[in-house]
Every structure is written in structure tokens, then in C-alpha cells.
Amino acid sequence: MIRLPKIECFTTSGGVKIYRIPCEVFPGFVAFAHLLFGAGPLTLVDVGSGYGHSDEHLLAGLETVRDKFGEKFQVADIQRIIITHGHIDHFGGLRGIAQHMPDAVIGIHSLDRRVLSHYEQRVIVATKSLRFYMQRAGVNPDDQAELLMWYGFSKKHVHNFDVGFTMADGDEIDGMRFIHTPGHCPGQVCIGIDEVLLTADHILPLTTPHQAPERITSYTGLGHYFESLDKVARIPGYELGLGGHEGPMRDIYGRIVDIRRSHEKKLDQVMAIVNESDGPTIQQITDKMYPRVEGFHVLLALEEVGAHVEYLYQHGDLVVCNVEEIEREDNPALRFIIA
Ligand SMILES: [Zn+2]
Ligand SMILES: [Zn+2]
């Protein structure tokens, strides 16, 4: 087990107390849940993955808030659970956690609602889309099977949950301002509370949040992500960012500039690789950009590169060069050249 970071408490200018509770959601990988006092009924934002020690960490963290920080509450007093987006490291703990909060109503953005309400069919449909995508990306059949295995590995222990309410862009609920920021995930929301922004996985202080092609899931993709970065950049006054992973951010706006730059660099890298190759597939571009990845990271790399290739294709910087094959075959790999 890793050593978790300490629980921290931030109080906003309007008096909302935000407790930041770490959980090890996958081996060596930490995510934060946030417990809010003063934003309407007692509210928990995200619940960890439900994998390994995640539930245990979250429940122990809630007890620490009571016992060490002196907040007078019981876990069963939590009335509302908000899920920032439909990724397993943020909602997978619902099964083990929500049973301790019998009165809690669950909320999520409507574009991720079915991830909670119809999880099993959603995984089946998404897995099929991923298979088509891998064929199109030129992944060889043996590797396809392995990548699908990785895709499915963390998704077995989750069930369906009743969604009590959905949030839409611009909603204000009990002092929480919801900003819909699709890209990393279709229903990704950031939550503004006074001068604090819970950025979930939209903006992280160290990591450039993972991107996948819209071809696999609508409302993801780099185009949506850039628009969502711009959207947050246009809202002034956030002085502290608390993401779903890693430490607090004092300069959200500067971080947005850096993240954008990192993607622009990757777009340039893709263009350079295509320029020096002979009509490469997404797989071949990925092999050059990420030659040393293993396991689950192979899939992440393929999606990340796929998102960048898709963006360049959408904007007419890249075109396909095997049109006859595409016309003739069922779902062949696309090969790209500079337009
Ligand atoms: Zn995520
Ligand atoms: Zn995450």
C-alpha cells in the first residue's frame, strides 16, 4: 500500500469547507474525493474506484474529517453524491460507499448518466466501438485482443445505480456552479464554489489529462477539449484549483496555457512523423511517439495519438491516402498523409 497524502481542508470566501480526501484507486495511483460542508446538504464529490483499498481509504478519510477535524457528522448524514465524470476512478466506489449513505441522492451530467444507470450495456457498446476503432487504427488482431482485455479489466465490479438528478452547464445548485467541460470525458464537469474550482480531470497540475478520439465516444476528442479549456479560461476569478488527482493548483489559467501548449507540441509531433513516414496508420504513429509503453498504457497511448490524428484530420491538415482500399474493404486501417 502506498502512503497517501494528508487530508486537507480549504475554506472558500463564502464559508464553504472543502475536505480533500485521498484514495488509492489503482495500485500506486491516487484520486481525491471532496466532502463539502456549507454547500446545501452535506455533499460528497466523487467516490474513488471501489478497487483494492479505495473504499477503505475513503471511509477512513470521512471518519478522520469527523474525529480529527472535529466536524460533527455521521457518514450516513451525507445527502448528496456528485460524480464529476463517468470514469471508474471517480464513480467505481459507489457500490461500496453509497450503502453507508442510505439517503444520498446521486447526480451526474446527463452525458455520463447512462454510465451509471446502464453500466453493463454501456461497456458492451463501448467495447464494440473500441474494437472497430482499433481495426481502423491498424492494430494487429493479437494486440486488439490484449488491449480489449485491458479495457475490460477494471470494469468488472461495477453495477447500475439510480441517478437522482443531472447537472447541466451553467446550473447553480446551493452555491456550486457547474461548468460542462467535455473532452476528457463526455459528461465532465468542473464545479466552481466561490473562488475555488473543483477541476476533476479536466485540468490537472502535472499530468496533461488523457484524451481519446471522438470516433470512439461522442463528446470526447481534442476539439471538445480545447473548447472546454477556453471556456474555463474565459471565467475569471478562480484562485485555487482542486483536481481529481495530484496537488492543489494556485494558477489554473497558467496551467491551461501549459496544457494547450503540450497538445500543440503533440500535434506538431504527429505532423512530423506523418511527414517522414510512408502513409502511416495510427498504430504506426503511436509506435513512434510512445515506443516504450506497456500494458494498459499501450491502450492509453493509442487513444491519445488517435485523438491528435483525428483533430488534424478534422481540420484538414491530414488526409487519407488509401481511398480505394477504404472503399473496397469493410473496415480497413486508415493511412494518413499531409494534406
Ligand atoms: Zn477521468
Ligand atoms: Zn481520474
Image: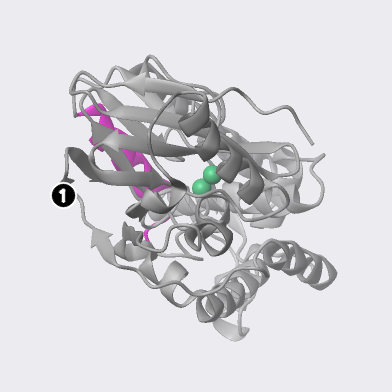
The local secondary structure at tag 1 comes to loop
Residue at 26% over, 62% down: 166
Tag count in the figure? Answer: 1
Residue at 45% over, 72% down: 161
> Residue 198 falls in which quadrant of the image?
top left
Q: Main secondary structure of the magenta part?
A: helix
Front residue (pair 123, 275): 123
Residue 162 placement (x, y as % from top left) = 38, 73
Amino acid type at circle 1 is Asp
Say above or below: 183 vs 257.
Answer: below
Residue 171 drawn in magenta: no
Residue 232 drawn in magenta: yes
Indicate how the structure is coloured in the image. Answer: one colour
Instruction: Tell me if mark 1 has few (under 14), some (14-19) or many (20+) residues whose alpha carbon lies within 10 angstroms of its own.
Output: some
Can residue 169 be seen in this snapshot? yes
> Residue 143 falls in which quadrant of the image?
bottom right
Residue 118 placement (x, y as % from top left) = 46, 78
Left or right of residue 127, residue 15 in this image: left
Q: Which residues are magenta?
A: 219-234
Can residue 257 be seen in this snapshot? no
Say above or below: 106 vs 201.
Answer: below
Which residue bears the numbered disc 1? 171
Say above or below: 258 vs 159.
Answer: above
Asked if the beta carbon under badge 1 is closer than 8 A to the nearest atom of ligand 1, the reply is no
Residue at 74% over, 37% down: 28
Left or right of residue 252, residue 332 in this image: right
Q: Quadrant of the N terminus?
A: top right
